Structure formats: C-alpha cells, structure tokens
Amino acid sequence: MIDTNRVGDEMYRWASDLFPINRSITGAGLRETLTYLKNILPDLTIHEVPSGTRAFDWTVPDEWNIQSAWIADEAGNRVVDFADNNLHVVAYSTPVDEWLTLEELQPHLHSLPDQPDAIPYVTSYYVRRWGFCLSHNEREALKSGRYHVVIDSTLAPGSLSYGELILPGREEKEILLSTYVCHPSMANNELSGPVVVAALAKWISDKSDRQFTYRILFLPETIGSIVYISTNLDAMKRNTIAGVVASCIGDDRGYSLLMSRGGDTLADRAGKLVMKHHAPDYVEYSYLDRGSDERQYCWPGVDLPVVSIMRVGYNGYPEYHTSLDDLTLISPAGLAGGFAAIRKFIELLESNHVYNVTVLCEPQLGRRGFYPTLGGRDVVNSVRSVSNVLAYADGTRDLVDIATHIGISPEEAIDIAKRLEDAGLLEVER
Amino acid sequence: MIDTNRVGDEMYRWASDLFPINRSITGAGLRETLTYLKNILPDLTIHEVPSGTRAFDWTVPDEWNIQSAWIADEAGNRVVDFADNNLHVVAYSTPVDEWLTLEELQPHLHSLPDQPDAIPYVTSYYVRRWGFCLSHNEREALKSGRYHVVIDSTLAPGSLSYGELILPGREEKEILLSTYVCHPSMANNELSGPVVVAALAKWISDKSDRQFTYRILFLPETIGSIVYISTNLDAMKRNTIAGVVASCIGDDRGYSLLMSRGGDTLADRAGKLVMKHHAPDYVEYSYLDRGSDERQYCWPGVDLPVVSIMRVGYNGYPEYHTSLDDLTLISPAGLAGGFAAIRKFIELLESNHVYNVTVLCEPQLGRRGFYPTLGGRDVVNSVRSVSNVLAYADGTRDLVDIATHIGISPEEAIDIAKRLEDAGLLEVER
Amino acid sequence: MIDTNRVGDEMYRWASDLFPINRSITGAGLRETLTYLKNILPDLTIHEVPSGTRAFDWTVPDEWNIQSAWIADEAGNRVVDFADNNLHVVAYSTPVDEWLTLEELQPHLHSLPDQPDAIPYVTSYYVRRWGFCLSHNEREALKSGRYHVVIDSTLAPGSLSYGELILPGREEKEILLSTYVCHPSMANNELSGPVVVAALAKWISDKSDRQFTYRILFLPETIGSIVYISTNLDAMKRNTIAGVVASCIGDDRGYSLLMSRGGDTLADRAGKLVMKHHAPDYVEYSYLDRGSDERQYCWPGVDLPVVSIMRVGYNGYPEYHTSLDDLTLISPAGLAGGFAAIRKFIELLESNHVYNVTVLCEPQLGRRGFYPTLGGRDVVNSVRSVSNVLAYADGTRDLVDIATHIGISPEEAIDIAKRLEDAGLLEVER
C-alpha cells in the first residue's frame, strides 16, 4: 500500500525546494532542476540538445542565462528587482543597461490591471526583446522621471536540457508520462507536474512485475516535446499504448481530464473510467481545450494515445501564469490526489486485458465460493458484478470497457478479474 | 381475430389449476405441471434428463420429492405446515425428524421482517440443508420450548423434466419461446409465463401459414435452460432469428422489455417497436438487469437473439418471491395483455422483410387508389405513411427498421407493406 | 462583394412581374414564365416534352390551357371570375358551359371554412374534373338559384416545358440547383424559388473560377423532376456532389433546412454548417417532412445528395397554398436572405477540401505572422481557430467537418484554410 500522506509531504517538500529556481526553456535553472530530479531518480538521463538543432518546424534557440536585473530610480532605489521574484523579467530578455524616462520605459513593462497585486508571467522566446513584469499597483506607483534599467543576461549558443527515464517492463509496449520543467517560480502550473511524475517514477521503479515499459519525460514545454518527438517518433508510435501529460495537478480544487485528439484511444477510455470513480465531478475537456504537450503528442501524424490529467487545469484558475500561483496554491493532499489519479490509471492499464469467459452459460458460482448457496430474494443482486464481468468477457471487450459498461470502479474490476482468472473462469485473450 | 377475453379467462383458469402444485427444479410437481400442459398442447414432448448428467459447468442434481413437512410444538399443534402452503419448506430440504429447542430451530427459519405477513420463497438446490419459511409475524409468535420438526422428503437419483414443442414452419429458421416451470405456488413469477406461452403455442399451432419454425420450451429455470442449451446449441445458433423469454407477465401493472446482451438484435429491434406501440410507457431494461433464462440464452458464445417481455418484471414488485405473489396478483386482463404483446412480436417477425421499392422516383399513388385524386392543401399528409414506407424501402432496411424510423405501429406497417406488395410497388429483397 | 440590397430589389421586381401569370404543370403560363427567365439567363434552354411521354411510373399529361372561366348568376353578374384571380379555377379543369342550381354547383366548389377570406389552391392533374375555388365568405354569400358556369379551357396533347441551364466548371463534378415553376399566382411557395435561383445563376455565371459545373433547373414540381431524372439520372448520379432545392425562400420569418433521405451527405453537412451560422435558430427537418422535388432527388435508387433550403417551409405558414400567399408575404430582404444562404452553401462547397497539415507537431505560427511573438496569459486563445484548423487537417476530414468540429463559421474556415495553404502549412489531399 502507498502511504499517501507520506508521498504528499515528500512531493510538497520537493516543490518547495524547486520553487525559487529561475527555470526557462533552456539555461542553468532548467539544468539545476533536472539535477535535483536526478537525485530523486538516479537513472534519469539528462540530455543536452545544441542550440540551432532543427526539429520539424522549429529550431532550438540560443541558451538564456541571467545573473541579475533591476530597475532603479534616479535615487538608486531598485523599484523592480529580479532578485525579489524571478517573474519580474520577461523570459529570454536580451541584456540592457540604459537610462530611460518612464514614458520610454512603459512599452517594456507588463502588468495586469484586473489583478493589480499579481506579477504576470511573460515570455519572448523567439523574438529578441527585453521587458519587466510587475504588479499593476507597483506600476501605477512609478513616478515620472528617469530610470536605470539593467538586465545582466546572456543569449548565446548552448543547449536545451531535458530529462528522460526509461523503466523497462516485460514488454516493449510502453506507457508515456510527460511533464514540463520550464517555468520560473510557479507552483501549480509547473512544479506540481514534475513532483507528481517523480513520485510516480519512484513508485513504478519499485514495482517488480511491470508488464509495460515506462517512458518518463521532464521537458521544457513545446520546444522540448517537439525536439523529443523529432528524434523518438518511430519508437513512440510503435510502442505507446497510452500516455498522460501531468500538469496543474497539485491544487485542492476539482479534477479534469483532457481527451486525446480522437477522444477514443485506450488512454481516453481508461482515463474516463478512472476519473469517474476517483473524482465523479471531474470536468472532461476535448482536445479543443488543449494547452500543454498533448498539443504535440496528439498532432496529426504523431497521434499518440495521450490524455492530460489535471486538477483545476489551464486557465481554469485566476492565479494561472502569475506570481499568485505560489506554494500556497498547492498542498500535500492536493499533490497526493493527483498522484493517486495517475497511479490508478497506470494500475488499470497494467491489469487491462481482453478476456474470454471459459464456460458456456453461467458458471456455477456457488460451488466456487462466489455465491451464497442459499437462494433467497436478495441473492440475485449480491454477486451481480462478478456475474457481469463474466457476461461481458466475450473476447471483444477489454477490462476498461467491461468496467465502464457495468458501472464498477477500476479497483473492483481488477479484483474481480483476478479472482475469476484464479478460479479458471476467465482467460486472457490478449 | 383473437377473442382476447376468452383467452384471458382460459389462461387464468389454467393458472388457477396449476397454482397449488409444489413445483421445483425436479420432481413430481414439475412432472405434474408438464402433464397438465401436455393436455393443452398434445404435441408437447416431455423429456427426462437423469440426475448426474453434465451440462457445461453444471450437473443435474438429484430429484427432490416431498410428502409432508411440519413443525409442531410440545402440545402437538402444527405451528407451520407444508400442507397449508408449499412455500413453508425451503426447496430441496433434506429429510429431518428431530426435537429442537426454539433456539436450535432459529437458524433453520426464514422470514422477512420488512414484510411480516409474507412467507418468503427460499431454495437450496446445490448445498444440502433443511429449513422452513414462515411469516415474520408467525415467527415472532413462536414461544420458547421444544419443537418437533419433520420433513418427509427424498433426495435421490431421478431426473430433471422439461417440455419441448417444435412447430415446424415453411422455413428451418426459428423463433424461440421460453418460460420456466419450477416455482411452487406463485402466480406472476411463475404461472403467468407458462400459461401465456401455452396460449401462444395454441395460437401458433392454429396458424396455417407459418413462415418460421417455433421452438417452445417449458423448463426449470437456470439448470433447465443450461441443460437444454448444452444439447441443442448448434441448431439454435444456426436457426434462431429471434426469441423471447416470458416471465412475470400476468399482472395489471406496467410493461417492460429486457434487451439482449448486445441490445441490437432483431429481437431487440422488434421488441422495442412492439412495446412502444403496445405500451408506450413500458420500461426498457438492459441485459445488466437480467433475471431469468435470458441469462443463459445471451451468454457469451451462446449469444442467441433473445429478449424478455414482462409486465412489471423481476424485483419490480414487492410480492416477488413471497406468498403474496398469489392468484390475486394476476388477472385475465393482465395475462391477455402479456399474451397480446408477444403475439404482436411474433406477427411482426412473420411479416418482416427487407423490401425494395420497384419504381424510381415516387410512384403515382393516385391511380392505384392510395391517394386522393384531387390535390389540396391537406393531401400531402394524408398518405404520408404509405409514401414513407416506400421511401425507405431501399433494400437496406427491414420492416421493423422502417416502421421504427417513420413512427408507425407494427400493425400499420404490416398492413401498408402488404397493400404495396399487392400493388406491385414493393418487392421482398430477403 | 454582392450588393445584397440591389439583388433583393431585383428579385422582388422579377417576382412582381411573374406573379400574375397563370402557371400550371404544362401550358402557356409555364412557357411564358420560362421565357421571362430566359431574358434574365440567356443561356437557359427551354425543353418541351410531349404529352404521353413515359417517365418511370408516370406519363406526361395533356397540355392544359385556359382562356377564361366564370360563374354568373341569373342576372348575369359574374360572382366568381378567373380574370380576377387565377386561383379561382381548379388547375386542369375540363371545359364546361352549363346552367346548374346552387345545389348542383356545390360539389364543384372549394373553400376553406377556417380561413374564410382565402381562396384555396386546388389541382386535379390526373383525374378529369372541373371546379372553382373561392373564399368561404364568397361561397356563403351565394344565393340559391341557377348559375351559368363557364370554363373555356383546353386539355389536349401538347408538351411539358422546363428550363435547364448548365454552367460548366473546371470539373465535371456538379452542384444541382432546382426549383419549381408550376403554381399560379402565389409568391412564397412559387416565385421565391425561381427568382432566388435565377439570381444565383447570374452570380454563378459571373464567377470566373468555378471548380464545379452547375446544373440549374426550373421545373414543374413532381412530374417535371421525374421527367428530368428519367432522362438524366446516370449523369446526375455520376457527377452530383451536392444539390439544393429552393422553395418558400422569400419571406421574413425563420429559416429551415430539410435533410436528404440519409441525412449525412456532403449537402447535409454543408447545409447544417451554413445554416448554423447564417441563421442559428433555423429549424432542421428530416426527409420525413419532405414536400418538394427533394422527394424525387432522394428517392431510393435516385439517391442524390440534395437538401432543401427554405425560409418558413411548406405548411409552416397559414397562407400556404392560398391566395394569401401573395406579394406582401415576400420582401426584398426576405429574398436576399434566402439568396445569401444558398450562396454561402455554394461558396463553402467550392472551397471544401480534405487537407493535410504539412508539418509534424505544431508549426511555429509566430514567425509566420499568425501568432503574437510575446507570450502572455491570453496568447493561447488568440489564434486558437488557426491552430484548430491545422490540428484537424489530418487527411480524413474535409473543411466542412473541421469547421463543424471546431465551431467556426464557413467564412472563417475558408479564410483560415486559404491563409494556411498560402503559408505552405496545409496541402489539399483531395
């Protein structure tokens, strides 16, 4: 049994450690994050892909690193400072050291009038510019005058880093777990994913009897998954039976499931069954609502069977992509709930088979201990689920379909199928 | 035309005659019931299957017979007596002749606290035990003390009896009617089935122009149908186009239709169309709600196209499987309604064909007498159903599908198709 | 750009010119109407099909012409006169010149008690009789006495006339436009169809770059389309990708779409998408509600992919098939709205392709100008429709399906597809 409390606390601790790091789609913060994860998962391989590498329609950009950045007034007071919050700088800002009037500075400032306390998260990966983000209140307080603007950053050939962990199973067929590690200090829309996936990877490593191989990825979003797919597509298409993108999975609000592009893969069917019993009020999104790396995994021609399991989901919460998405937004229990949802998804996949019942007509469940031997008015319903699993084990439905059709949870379905297989009443067709 | 009142009265009389007999899944009461039915249906064949015969996962049990059974108090008063009601003994009770304290007796007693006036119906076919059933009020009134418990029964090799009637038609393709004859004195959940099926068998026998062969079965539930299927499966799979299990079909409450496992066979489609027009408020159950021999007929690998037509249905009424399910629960009109539902189902199947319209574009219905010759504003709708039957007679839909799609009753569909065939506008494709 | 006001006014003027003509399924009025249309569409071919010609189940009837008709009282006052309104005579009335009592006359009179001011429209094409139609108020006012009844008509071998315009495109594949020209003075259920189709034909003629060939028909309803299909079925079946019947398309009430018999052809899919955006409250009818020549085009074995686009639709308005369906019931704006609906349908078909996205994984829309280069919280949704078109361009869906699935209008879908094709991101699969 998993000690859920312990896992939740551990994940929250990892998130707290990783929170201050200034991650982006390349650079030192990304590399530091992957190194931290490698301490947890010693078999994690950290890959470096050189700037300029082509990947389908994209090119790996120069590596971005930043030492410091601030805006100071004429008196030398730093009115905005990267040292206070790494969201203060537009990601991929070019270096600058200038004196500007407030009027000249304004086009480089970003704030949210409708959330005046929040620092927004802004990026400019592929067009060179610089900028600062600050709360609208701070911006409104700026007095006219001249400001000294400094960004001590570098944009130069380097590499894009990502982490990959392959956990072999009895079969080459594999399950994909993917999450992203490219946002600076944000908790739910960043760190919840890596810490839940890291905890899952530990749990999978400890399973001695894995049927499937696991491909576990910690990538910079978009460019990272595109680069990864460009070099691994054949193997992924050949082997992947189901996958999940973990994102926004640490808060205590609802749950959501974002379906694959087609909406009818094994990942979709298993995801729906798990979520219906794990969180009956979960929200189901179609691929039209996509937001993270499922965009790439389900793209035409890539077409991997991948869903996203989230708690409140992209854009579904007001703190999204602002400084308000901090460590108070996630919790050990919230992370543990997300962990449990994906764990159940994996357990279901590991136990999923197309079954055939081995006898024609109902078997005599009574003499096998599945059925009361005394027939009364209530007996008919008492082992209904056992009988239903048998009645739909007709060589055309897998356990996911059977459980969905007869209305039982994944856990109950797995338990019943195992008992019936042990009793010789079910055979695995495939 | 069927004289419905006469048929209803006749069925009710048969049920009244059969009510007192102590039926079980084997034994003298079952045999006496089949003999009574053979008086109605002289061509009925009564088969005997020896105890110990294997049938798939099952074995025909020893034959059970019982002469008498009672519980007497120390004064010799019979406080429970099988002679009063054959539900008082747990079916398949082993013989006993003992003096027991009330405390020792209690584990052998069965009653229903929530229905204190009802004697429950309890069986123990495959585990040897004995027991008595009584109303909870009677049970509560038992005084402490010693009781003389006597069951004069035998459990010994013998045979399982069932009745089979084959009514040949022009084709080998056949329609299955199945009902059960294994419950002691209960009216709706027992006798309604056999008397409705007996009346249908008489009516079918009198039809001179049957397209289909009819296989009509009176079986002990579960073990009887399993035994029957085990020796007739090939022929049944080859020939059966549709079938119906008749059960709980004599009350005056609603109607219900229980679909086959797949839910889309001819029997399902025809059943839905018939019920929609015969009883628009009927309840539709899936195979997940199965309760009688459709459990076997639709089992994976058996997979016959069989539905159940019921009135209120298993477990749908509080008197189910108790002494309250007596002759007051059924009525001539209730039985006649059930009879009519299945009769319409059979008539629809006998007239069901895939049709082709014989002309391209609309035929001129006016000169054939289907259409007013004077065109005014209301004409368009006046023969709409005739035109609709033609418009969907495209060689892909059978009459059941056409009637369902265009919203007409089976009777209207049969009548229109016949008139159009006579007029040369429809041809049977198959 | 179409000048909608100008087109609406022009169509209304044509309808006003054509209104007084006494059309029927044959005869001088029909021919005069076609001649008027040929003035608008010089390439229109007027065909004449001799009386007695067989067409599937039908025969072209004798040609009907009428000079005058009236009922006069004993004082010589014309109480009903065809000269006042050509609806006063039952279409195809045989000649008569008799004196009758009011009682003898009554069986020959037709009126509508529930619409006492309306003259009904009545026909008797295939059974020879004569009759007069009048308002119920006029009929009630008739005094007993003798009446002189005169119909100066001829029913004699002649021909059935229809108009056909073929506008070749780059491909042989064709789009069908069909409307009817056989009703006397009625505006919505007659003239709206021909004037909208004539305007569309002018607009199509002016398109220099037609992909498809257009087959545009002005026919007497039913017999005309049957005759036409009987001689053109092979070519129509081989080439027609979609078609539309235009009928009741000039009022200012709602819109409706009547689906083909199968309901899932390209015409159905395109029609639904257009109507959903052109008139979100449009009513969708199935083929069960058919009323005009779609009855023939979708008949089994004919099975052309044809829908009807209407405004209020057959029988949907109280003035239908009466003298109240006059020029006040239609309007320039009403006609222009109907014209626009079918124009959008054609524009969508002309731009409809199955597309393939040319890159694996998302393309970098930013550097192609589709995407803001500065990533902030709202960017994800800003070019969502562009991304969605790409994401579903997987070689299995045409533009109609993509736009329907992602919820954008035909115009937006056409625009986006063109921009993406220009940018090299989409390729036409077929």
Image (cartoon, coloured by chain):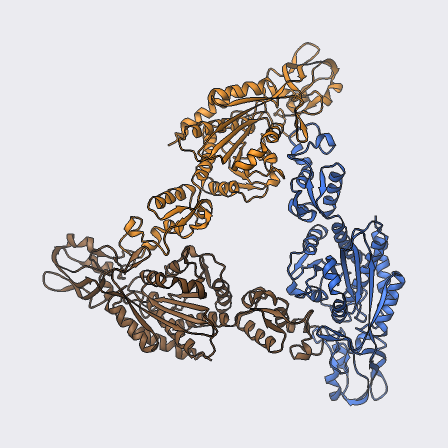
Chain colours: A orange, B brown, C blue
Q: Position of residue B88 (x, y in %)?
A: 22, 63
In the image as oriented, which residue stretches furthest toward the top?
A75
Inspect this view and state whether residue B274 appears: yes
Q: Where is residue A367 in the image (x, y as percent from the top left)?
A: 28, 51
Q: Where is residue A205 in the image (x, y as percent from the top left)?
A: 43, 28
Q: In which quarter of the image is residue A375?
A: bottom left
Looking at the image, is C140 positioned above or below residue A296? Answer: below
Q: In this view, does C329 lie to the left or right of A403?
A: right
Q: Is residue A2 left or right of residue B384?
A: left
Q: Is residue C418 left or right of residue B231?
A: right
Inspect this view and state whether residue C310 appears: no
Q: Quadrant of residue C30?
A: bottom right
On-image quarter of the C terminus of chain B = bottom right
Looking at the image, is A152 positioned above or below residue C171? Answer: above
Q: How many dots with numbers?
A: 0
C177, C395: nearer the viewer: C395
B77, B221: nearer the viewer: B221
In the image as oriented, which residue stretches furthest toward the left?
B75
Q: Which residue is drawn at 86% across and 74% down?
A: C28
Q: Quadrant of residue C102?
A: bottom right
